[in-house]
Amino acid sequence: MGTGTGSVVGHAASTTPFGPERFTSNHATYVITTKSTYYRRIWESAISAWNKTGAFHFRAGSKNRAQIVLSTASGNDAAVMGEDVGLTDFRAVGDYFVKVDAMLNPSLFREYDYSRSDDLHVAEHELGHTMGLAHNPSKASVMYYRNRSVGIQKVDIKGVVLRYKTPAGQSLS
């Protein structure tokens, strides 16, 4: 469910792992580009859930200047995503995110009969990647690579806090 964070198999992590890339600080601007009211609300609920943790702050921005673009896949995008229900990609300079794109795949949500709660957890997972989190080998984490039923956990919050206390370029695996 994220670029550059392939499947992880191993023991449970007490802190969700993170990659070397991050924003310069623990806040970023976003824009939601989906036309669907339903998926706009899913993204907004996921943002609210992460903001409530206090580990990171997402702030609405303008379409031209937002650091994060949140969208839904349709047509060709959905086909390119294959079996991924969510996908996050980024551009970074010097281990700092410049632009991050996160996308949900509604056609697979429907095909796999995902509930609203499942959709929300996938959005929370993709937002985890937008902050720099990697996959957690534990199923008790929103960042488990095949997650759809678990929301944000303490290990995930710890991962974000540590990501932004740790200099860019360093990672936790």
Image (cartoon, rainbow, N blue to C red):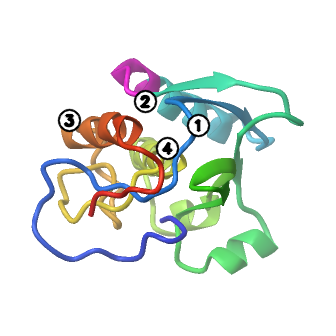
On screen, residue 104 versus residue 35, left or right, reads left
- Residue that numbered label 2 is attached to: 50
Q: Main secondary structure of the magenta part?
A: helix
Reply yes or no: does residue 62 show up in magenta: no
- Classify 158 as above or below 3: above
Three-letter code for the amino acid on which mark 4 is drawn: Met
> Amino acid under label 3?
Lys
Q: Tags 4 and 2 in contact by the CB under 8 Å rule?
A: yes
The reply to whether dot 1 and dot 4 touch (C-beta < 8 Å) is no
Q: Residue at x 29, y 56 (%)?
A: 17
Q: Secondary structure at mark 4?
A: helix
Which badge, 4 or 2, is on the more N-terminal residue? Answer: 2
Instruction: Tell me the element at label 2.
Output: helix
Cα distance, mark 4 to mark 2? Answer: 10 Å
Residue at 38% across, 59% down: 134
Q: CA distance from mark 1 to mark 4?
A: 15 Å
Q: CA distance from mark 1 to mark 3?
A: 21 Å
Which residue in the structure is indicated by mark 1? 43
The residue stretch that appears in magenta: 49-55
Q: Amino acid at mark 2?
A: Trp
The x, y position of residue 106, in whole percent, is 62, 58
Give the mark, 1 or 3, whose residue is nearer the N terminus: 1
Label located before the other in sequence (1 or 4): 1
**1 and 3 marks in contact (CB < 8 Å):** no
Which residue is disc 4 drawn over?
Answer: 131
Q: Position of residue 48 (x, y in %)?
A: 49, 23
Tell which tag, 1 or 4, sits nearer the viewer: 4
- How many angstroms separate mark 3 from mark 2 (CA)? 11 Å
Pointer 3 residue: 154
Q: Residues within 10 Å of mark 4 (few under 14, many from 20)?
A: many
Instruction: Quote the CA–CA distance across marks 1 and 2.
Output: 11 Å
